[in-house]
Image (cartoon, rainbow, N blue to C red):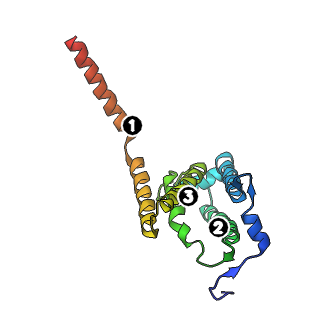
């Protein structure tokens, strides 16, 4: 609203901060890794984190156990907004200007990272570390597709195919397949013993 939707250049100090590297590793990657570690510890190692998981997995059950779910739902959005703000500031420094549409290209990959990381579309328990690793994977996949000369449409298709593949793999009943494989192997060994 302040800029009328036009892009504005950012301060040189922010550009220097966003592009700073420690060795060959960008500082923004270290910030992301630190944030993932802190959130993972908070979610998995504290009572408040377990309540967030309970509210995400089943709000009705969480409410019946005495958890004030609205407080935790709002808290989730506030925490997400803080992460988005940090990311937006780093992105503005990286590209050298602030624009309301600068992060639009990252909307599908961010959803894909969460899905590929194992969090279901319906909500519930997920892994912050797995989502962080999946985000790294999706970024590398995007770079590989770009290096192969694919256009934006092909990049979106590859990302969508990755989401479908990850979702499909999770739907495979692994226990049933293992039981079937074990029973087939047992039948074959019984058959070979009978022939022997």
The Cα–Cα distance between marks 3 and 2, rounded to whole angstroms, is 17 Å
Place of residue 178 in the rendered image (x, y in percent of width and height, measured from the top left): 37, 33
Q: Residue at x 46, y 63 (%)?
A: 149
Query: Of tags 1 and 2, which is closer to the observer?
Result: 2
Place of residue 84 in the rendered image (x, y in percent of width and height, measured from the top left): 64, 67
Q: Nearer the viewer, residue 162 or 65?
A: 162
Q: Is residue 42 left or right of residue 115?
A: right
Q: Which mark is residue 175?
A: 1
Q: Residue at x 71, y 79 (%)?
A: 9
Q: Is residue 7 left or right of residue 61?
A: right
Query: Of tags 1 and 3, which is closer to the observer?
Result: 3
Looking at the image, tell me whether mark 3 or mark 2 is earlier in sequence order: 2
Identify the secondary structure beneath mark 2.
Answer: helix
The Cα–Cα distance between marks 1 and 3, rounded to whole angstroms, is 32 Å
Q: Which mark is residue 84?
A: 2
Establish if 27 lies above or below 78. above
Asked if residue 139 can be seen in this view, the reply is yes
Q: Which residue is mark 3?
A: 139
The Cα–Cα distance between marks 1 and 2, rounded to whole angstroms, is 38 Å
Q: Residue at x 69, y 82 (%)?
A: 8
Identify the secondary structure beneath mark 3.
Answer: helix
CB under 8 Å between callouts 1 and 2?
no
Identify the secondary structure beneath mark 1.
Answer: helix
What is the quadrant of residue 83 in the picture? bottom right
Q: Residue at x 63, y 85 (%)?
A: 6
């Amino acid at each position: 609203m302040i800029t009328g939707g036009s892009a504005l250049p950012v301060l040189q100090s922010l550009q220097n901060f966003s592009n700073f590297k420690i060795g060959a590793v960008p500082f923004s990657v270290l910030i992301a890794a630190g944030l993932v570690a802190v959130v993972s510890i908070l979610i998995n190692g504290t009572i408040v984190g377990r309540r967030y998981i309970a509210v995400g997995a089943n709000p009705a059950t969480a409410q019946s156990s005495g958890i004030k779910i609205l407080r935790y739902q709002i808290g989730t959005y506030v925490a997400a907004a803080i992460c988005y703000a940090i990311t937006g500031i780093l992105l503005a420094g990286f590209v050298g200007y602030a624009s309301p549409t600068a992060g639009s290209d990252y909307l599908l990959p961010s959803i894909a990272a969460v899905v590929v990381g194992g969090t279901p579309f319906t909500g519930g328990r997920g892994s912050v570390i797995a989502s962080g690793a999946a985000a790294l994977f999706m970024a590398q996949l995007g770079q590989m597709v770009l290096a192969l000369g694919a256009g934006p449409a092909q990049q979106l298709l590859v990302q969508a195919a990755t989401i479908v593949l990850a979702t499909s793999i999770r739907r495979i009943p692994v226990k049933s397949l293992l039981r079937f494989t074990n029973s087939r192997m047992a039948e074959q060994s019984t058959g070979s013993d009978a022939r022997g």
